[in-house]
């Protein structure tokens, strides 16, 4: 499947699509470049190292591929044992890439050597999402379809996580650390609310959101951001996007929805 970089000409905003249907955008958006292809669906993408020059993609063809967006060439690739469902990086150690997927493993790769450094097991279902700790790249989360998010120390080999969250009734769709690393924010594949866990113990602290609706309303994505006032961080925000087309911003201090008009985003 092709990786295509598009631009919206009036605003020159760049939008990245991992798509096997790029023709559906014809007449609406214009491709800047086609970087290359995977032999399976593209499941996960991110820009690596804090700029737009290096793109990392994960695919159902069992590979993580690294692309130079300037030369449009693949510069490296890493093999997994099955579909790659999630990839992540960290600005703390830009040579590291984290991947997880249907082989039930999280693997830390070294972009400099082109080799996988360490594999971490313990999950009983697909690894749906991976994420590094925001302040210490030795730690990361691997979240699984078995309903558990596991925190690993990449300096330790093997299948024993240092923390496991209390098990949910449904698979974990996504999980992120809070900006200070103290909490884990998580959403499942079938629920409309999200959960705060203690990152040190794995215990459930609070369920947040709308405890109504079924799988068709479930949260699909969750991100953590800073809420700024006078260019100073005032608090932390969690944004959720759901299958019912809703997007909510949550102040993690009070756990109530915040209108988007009241937000100032970091970097804008």
Image (tube, rainbow, N blue to C red):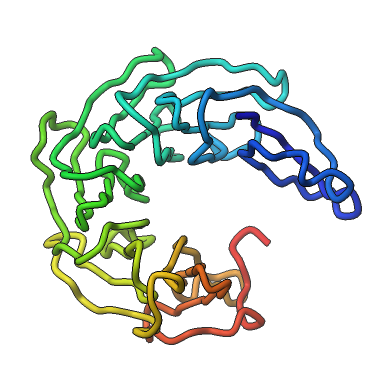
Q: In the rendering, at what x and y percent does residue 233 appear?
A: 50, 70
The correct choice, above or below, for 266 with respect to 37 in the image is below
Q: How many marks?
A: 0
**What residue is rendered at 46% in x and 40% in y?**
91
**What residue is rendered at 23% in x and 25% in y?**
118
Q: In the rendering, at what x and y percent does residue 49 appear?
A: 53, 35
| Left or right of residue 223, residue 142 in this image | left
The picture quadrant where one finds residue 147 is bottom left
| Left or right of residue 42, residue 33 in this image | right
**What residue is rendered at 43% in x and 67% in y?**
219
Q: In the rendering, at what x and y percent does residue 78 appear?
A: 40, 20
Quadrant assignment for the C terminus: bottom right
**What residue is rendered at 58% in x and 32% in y?**
55
Q: Residue furthest top?
A: 113
Q: Nearer the viewer, residue 68 or 139?
A: 68
| Left or right of residue 132, residue 34 in this image | right
Q: In the rendering, at what x and y percent does residue 94 appear?
A: 45, 31
Q: Nearer the viewer, residue 152 or 49?
A: 152
Quadrant assignment for the N terminus: top right
């Amino acid at each position: 499947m092709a990786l295509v970089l598009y631009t919206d000409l009036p605003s020159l905003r760049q939008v990245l699509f991992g798509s096997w249907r790029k023709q559906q955008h014809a007449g609406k958006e214009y491709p800047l470049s086609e970087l290359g292809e995977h032999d399976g669906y593209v499941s996960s993408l991110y820009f690596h190292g804090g700029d737009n020059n290096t793109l990392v993609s994960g695919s159902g063809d069992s590979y993580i591929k690294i692309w130079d967006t300037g030369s449009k060439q693949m510069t490296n690739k890493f093999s997994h044992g099955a579909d790659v469902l999630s990839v992540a990086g960290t600005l703390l150690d830009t040579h590291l890439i984290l991947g997880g997927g249907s082989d039930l493993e999280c693997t830390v790769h070294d972009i400099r050597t082109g080799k996988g450094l360490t594999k971490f097991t313990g999950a009983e279902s697909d690894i749906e999402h991976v994420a590094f700790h925001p302040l210490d790249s030795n730690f990361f989360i691997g979240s699984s379809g078995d309903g558990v998010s596991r925190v690993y120390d990449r300096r330790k080999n093997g299948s024993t996580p240092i923390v496991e969250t209390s098990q949910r009734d449904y698979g974990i769709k996504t999980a992120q650390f809070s900006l200070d690393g103290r909490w884990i924010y998580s959403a499942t594949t079938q629920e409309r609310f999200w959960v705060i866990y203690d990152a040190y113990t794995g215990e459930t602290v609070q369920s947040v959101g709308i405890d109504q609706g079924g799988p068709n309303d479930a949260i699909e994505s969750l991100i953590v951001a800073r809420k700024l006032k006078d260019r100073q961080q005032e608090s932390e925000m969690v944004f959720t996007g759901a299958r019912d087309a809703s997007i909510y911003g949550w102040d993690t201090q009070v756990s109530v929805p915040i209108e988007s008009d009241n937000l100032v985003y970091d970097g804008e």
